[in-house]
Image: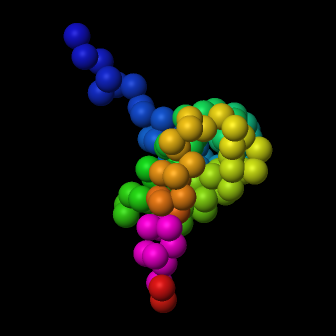
Amino acid sequence: KDCSMSVPSTSDSLKQALQALYHHPDKSVRSQANEWLQQFQQTTEAWQVSDSLLHNSESNSEVQYFCSQTLKKKAQRDFEELPADAPKHLRDSVIVLILRLPGQ
């Protein structure tokens, strides 16, 4: 039986955590969201999820900013965890994103 519909994807969880961090009135909820986001940034999954959300035209500016910062941090601290072919893909992906910027 497929129960994946009831389990939020990491992308959905990330978006929910960002929504809570920036907009929830309860400080403890914001703190929990911040902790989850910091832990997410330390995962190997953060590379792919962040890249994917940056290419998603439905991502809001908060998601785009967080994912950009995540890739920057990952590149600075965790570059060695990438598979051998991944740096080329990441470079190409970032180039595509840069070329989409207004005024480019």
Residue 82 falls in image quadrant: top right
The location of residue 97, given as percent across then percent down, is 47, 67
- Quarter of the image with the N terminus in it: top left
Q: Is residue 73 magenta?
A: no
Residue 77 falls in image quadrant: top right
Q: Is residue 98 magenta?
A: yes
Magenta range: 95-102
Give the side of residue 4 with respect to residue 62, left or right: left
Which residue is outermost to the front?
84
Which residue is outermost to the right?
77
Q: Residue at horizontal 39%, vertical 58%?
A: 56
Q: Residue at horizontal 61%, vertical 59%?
A: 68
Q: Residue at horizontal 51%, vertical 72%?
A: 98
Which residue is outermost to the bottom?
103
The tally of labels here is: 0
Q: Residue at horizontal 42%, vertical 34%?
A: 9
- Foreground pick, 98 / 55: 98
Q: Is residue 63 visible?
A: no
Way the structure is coloured = rainbow
Give the side of residue 101 with respect to residue 71, left or right: left
Q: Is residue 70 visible?
A: yes
- Foreground pick, 39 / 15: 39
- Above or below — where is 47 with respect to 54? above
- Foreground pick, 54 / 15: 54
The location of residue 32, given as percent across then percent down, is 69, 36
**What predominant SS class does the magenta segment belong to?**
helix
Give the side of residue 79 with respect to residue 99, left or right: right
The location of residue 95, given as percent across then percent down, is 50, 67
Give the side of residue 48 with respect to residue 44, left or right: left
- Above or below — where is 103 with respect to 81? below
The location of residue 48, given as percent across then percent down, is 50, 42
